[in-house]
């Protein structure tokens, strides 16, 4: 990870994803536990994986920093919160706190936000609508704030899904909020277009009535998904780690972190 630190700047995205290794037909592998298979949206036996990669907005390379496998019944396991916070602190301890942590809705957890705020980490996290936030002097659900949030800015993007170009017209705006029982001001960026419900991004980055500032945050989140999906694809095609048990898979994933990889188009 020390080698990677020279490639990471102030606005590098550190993309953290919680995924799984599904052991669909295994019964007697060590420390098997129940995980949610994200690809099939069902529960099954397997192991949990916390992955971190560094990428630049619109860059063509990614740097895998951490591929950490854990089981909730393995010796030494305390909690998923502890596992994730330890990964964040390990990475930041090696490269410094200059990066922006980007997480999908799996990162929308108060017990992750609080230690990250206390440690001074920057983050950009997609929210679930049921998160309570303080807006003005009231505690309100995030989706209620989003429903009435003005979105005066607009942009058009083109994304490739399954080899097909799709055009999205995005409208976006923001609100200044905070977490209950926390004093730090946070930005809530609201984006309309991707689905029936608006997309909500919670960030430590300063937000204001400025198209460039808000659009940079929207682009950071939308760009983060591409490298992560391609990393998972590379792992699935290039390795047979799903054949291994806990100890062997742990060693393979934890040792695969360098050099930088050029992303396939």
Image (cartoon, rainbow, N blue to C red):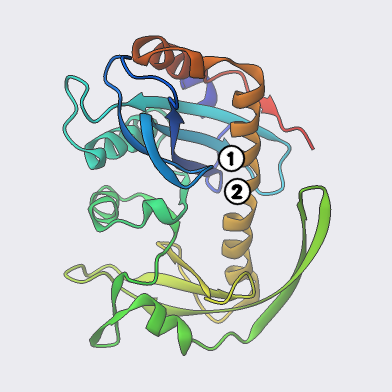
Q: Where is residue 45 in the image (x, y as percent from the top left)?
A: 36, 30
Residue 137 position by quadrant: bottom left
| 202 to the left or right of 237 | left
Q: Where is residue 50 in the image (x, y as percent from the top left)?
A: 40, 34
Residue 12 position by quadrant: top right
Density class for disc 1 (Cα within 10 Å; few <14, some 14-19, many ≥20) is: many
Q: Which residue is drawn at 63% across and 43% down?
A: 56
Image position of 12 with respect to 196: above or below: above
Q: Say what secondary structure mark 2 lies in.
A: helix
Image position of 118 with respect to 167: above or below: above
- The reply to whether callout 1 and callout 2 are in contact (CB within 8 Å) is yes
Density class for disc 2 (Cα within 10 Å; few <14, some 14-19, many ≥20) is: some
* Residue 202 appears in the rendering: yes
Q: Residue at x 39, y 19 (%)?
A: 26
**26 or 37, nearer to the observer:** 26
Q: Position of residue 103 (x, y in %)?
A: 45, 50
Q: Where is residue 205 in the image (x, y as percent from the top left)?
A: 45, 63
Q: Name the residue tied to disc 2.
A: 225
| 205 to the left or right of 63 | left
Q: Quadrant of the C terminus?
A: top right
Q: Name the residue tied to disc 1.
A: 228
**33 or 203, nearer to the observer:** 33
Alpha-carbon distance for marks 1 and 2? 5 Å
**25 or 120, nearer to the observer:** 25
Q: Which residue is drawn at 24% across and 87% down?
A: 138
Image position of 9 with respect to 91: above or below: below
Q: Residue at x 33, y 19 (%)?
A: 27
């Amino acid at each position: 990870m020390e080698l990677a630190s020279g490639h990471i700047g102030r606005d590098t995205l550190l993309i953290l994803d919680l995924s799984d290794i599904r052991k669909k037909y295994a019964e007697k592998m060590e420390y098997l536990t129940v995980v949610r298979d994200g690809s099939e949206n069902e529960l099954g036996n397997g192991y949990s994986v916390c992955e971190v990669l560094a990428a630049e907005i619109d860059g063509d390379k990614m740097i895998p920093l951490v591929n950490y496998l854990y089981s909730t019944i393995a010796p030494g396991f305390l909690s998923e919160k502890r596992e994730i916070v330890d990964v964040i602190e390990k990475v930041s301890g090696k490269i410094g706190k200059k990066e922006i942590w980007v997480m999908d809705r799996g990162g929308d957890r108060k017990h992750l936000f609080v230690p990250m705020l206390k440690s001074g980490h920057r983050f950009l996290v997609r929210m679930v609508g049921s998160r309570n936030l303080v807006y003005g002097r009231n505690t309100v659900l995030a989706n209620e704030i989003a429903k009435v949030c003005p979105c005066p800015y607009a942009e058009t993007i083109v994304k490739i899904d399954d080899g097909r170009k799709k055009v999205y017209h995005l409208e976006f705006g923001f609100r200044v909020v905070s977490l209950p029982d926390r004093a730090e001001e946070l930005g809530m960026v609201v984006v309309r277009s991707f689905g029936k419900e608006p997309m909500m991004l919670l960030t430590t980055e300063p937000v204001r009535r400025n198209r460039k500032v808000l659009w940079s945050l929207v682009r950071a989140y939308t760009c983060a998904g591409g490298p992560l999906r391609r990393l998972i694809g590379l792992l699935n095609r290039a390795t047979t780690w799903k054949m291994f048990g806990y100890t062997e898979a742990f060693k393979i994933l934890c040792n695969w972190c360098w050099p930088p990889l050029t992303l396939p188009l």
